[in-house]
């Protein structure tokens, strides 16, 4: 007899029913979702082949563990619109957090999903203006706070000098004692450090994804800023974006399963640092540069829903709650 396990998930006020079904004749668990059945084993084998993931050296028990994680994540993916199987689907949430999170800051006292926006709002794209540095990779280190701050400085220096430098995030990990290197950090403290001390180049201090024993500090650090401003709402965020890219933080809960398109999420804990580089009014999205490498999402970028209706805009993933713009 088939065994049914019903999972009811509330997603954007829509009830989605998922049935886990055991077929005794094939000895397989299948996932029934919207009249379709998903063979977990088949999807797992396809996943391993697509992303060239093998466990020959780890043993059978590790592969079984990874299959269980993959299965749990697949159920979650199918329960939420806009999510996909990605190269990270065999990882736990904590493992993915280690390679993408890093912002450790006080959360706002309240969260507003919809916020007022200026009626004169218009689109702006700083990537097309060549004002954004290449996407970088933070690796197994919760350092998105450092990458976000540095990305903001690189863009600010382009707007001043017409050239984008390649600045060292490692310099922050090694020298900024107000933050916790690969254990996370505060974007504003990082920006304050850059304001007071400056940073060196990537060539002088390349990224290693761990804190080195010595701080490689030059007497005169070549890259710095003159000031920065704090932004705490969507109206001011999009006004600031007209002047240049903005250092932001978002909730990274669903980034593990983001492959492309416009992501809509109600999560609002700011734990992933990034750089807001575009707002598209016609299509209703924010575009953010991450530090997850060019293989993530859309060549290292993620688009979040930013629809405007009746003078209100979505504060998706808490993007508007606390941001910073730096000036060279």
Image (cartoon, helix red, strand yellow):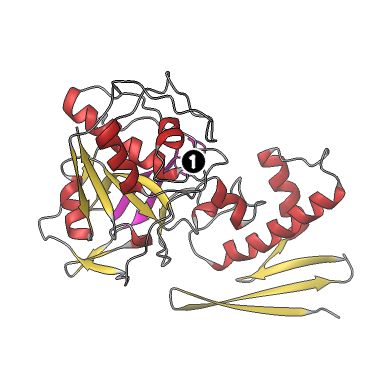
- Residue farthest toward the left in the current orientation of the protein: 120
- Residue 53 magenta-highlighted: no
Q: Quadrant of the N terminus?
A: bottom right
Query: In terms of depth relative to the viewer, which is nearer, 215 or 56?
Result: 215
Location of residue 134 in the rendering, given as x and y in whole percent from the top left corner:
39, 30
Q: Is residue 322 left or right of residue 83?
A: left
Start-end of magenta stretch: 284-305
Q: From this viewpoint, is residue 127 visible?
A: no
Q: Residue at x 50, y 42 (%)?
A: 296
Q: Is residue 173 left or right of residue 160?
A: right
Query: In terms of depth relative to the viewer, which is nearer, 128 or 39?
Result: 128
Q: Quadrant of residue 317?
A: bottom left
- Residue 295 magenta-highlighted: yes
Q: Is residue 137 above or below residue 255?
A: above
Query: In terms of depth relative to the viewer, which is nearer, 35 or 157?
Result: 157
Q: Residues within 10 Å of mark 1 (few under 14, many from 20)?
A: many
Q: Quadrant of residue 313?
A: bottom left
Q: Is residue 82 above or below residue 21?
A: above
Location of residue 26 in the rendering, given as x and y in whole percent from the top left corner:
87, 65
Q: From this viewpoint, is residue 292 visible?
A: yes
Query: In terms of depth relative to the viewer, which is nearer, 238 or 283?
Result: 238
Q: Is residue 246 above or below residue 21?
A: above
Location of residue 189 in the rendering, given as x and y in whole percent from the top left corner:
33, 46
Location of residue 286 in the rendering, given as x and y in whole percent from the top left corner:
31, 51
Q: Residue at x 28, y 61 (%)?
A: 307
Q: Residue at x 67, y 63 (%)?
A: 72
Q: Secondary structure at mark 1?
A: loop
Q: Is residue 324 left or right of residue 42?
A: left
Q: Quadrant of the C terminus?
A: top left
Q: Which residue is mark 1?
A: 292
């Amino acid at each position: 007899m088939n065994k049914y396990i019903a999972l009811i998930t509330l997603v954007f006020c829509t009830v989605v029913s998922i049935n886990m079904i055991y077929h005794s004749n094939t000895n397989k668990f299948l996932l029934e979702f919207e009249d379709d059945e998903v063979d977990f084993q088949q999807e797992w084998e396809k996943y391993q082949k697509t992303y060239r993931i093998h466990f020959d050296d780890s043993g059978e028990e590790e592969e079984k563990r990874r299959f269980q994680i993959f299965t749990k994540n697949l159920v979650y993916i199918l329960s939420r619109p806009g999510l996909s199987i990605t190269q990270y689907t065999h990882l736990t949430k904590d493992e993915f957090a280690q390679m993408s999170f890093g912002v450790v800051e006080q959360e706002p006292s309240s969260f507003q999903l919809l916020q007022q926006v200026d009626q004169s709002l218009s689109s702006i794209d700083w990537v097309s203006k060549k004002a954004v540095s290449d996407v970088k990779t933070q690796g197994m280190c919760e350092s998105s706070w450092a990458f976000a701050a540095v990305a903001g400085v690189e863009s600010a220096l382009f707007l001043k000098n017409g050239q984008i430098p390649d600045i060292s995030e490692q310099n922050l990990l090694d020298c900024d004692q107000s933050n916790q290197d690969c254990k996370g950090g505060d974007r504003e403290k990082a920006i304050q450090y850059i304001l007071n001390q400056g940073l060196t180049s990537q060539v002088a201090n390349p990224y290693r994804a761990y804190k080195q024993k010595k701080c490689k500090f030059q007497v005169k650090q070549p890259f710095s800023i003159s000031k920065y401003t704090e932004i705490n709402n969507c109206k001011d965020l999009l006004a600031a974006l007209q002047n240049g890219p903005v250092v932001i933080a978002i909730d990274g809960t669903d980034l593990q399963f983001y492959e492309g398109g416009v992501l809509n999420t109600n999560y609002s804990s700011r734990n992933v640092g990034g750089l807001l580089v575009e707002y598209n009014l016609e299509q209703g999205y924010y575009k953010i540069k991450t530090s997850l490498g060019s293989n993530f999402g859309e060549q290292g970028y993620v688009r979040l829903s930013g629809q405007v209706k009746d003078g209100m805009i979505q504060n998706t993933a808490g993007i508007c709650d606390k941001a910073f713009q730096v000036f060279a």
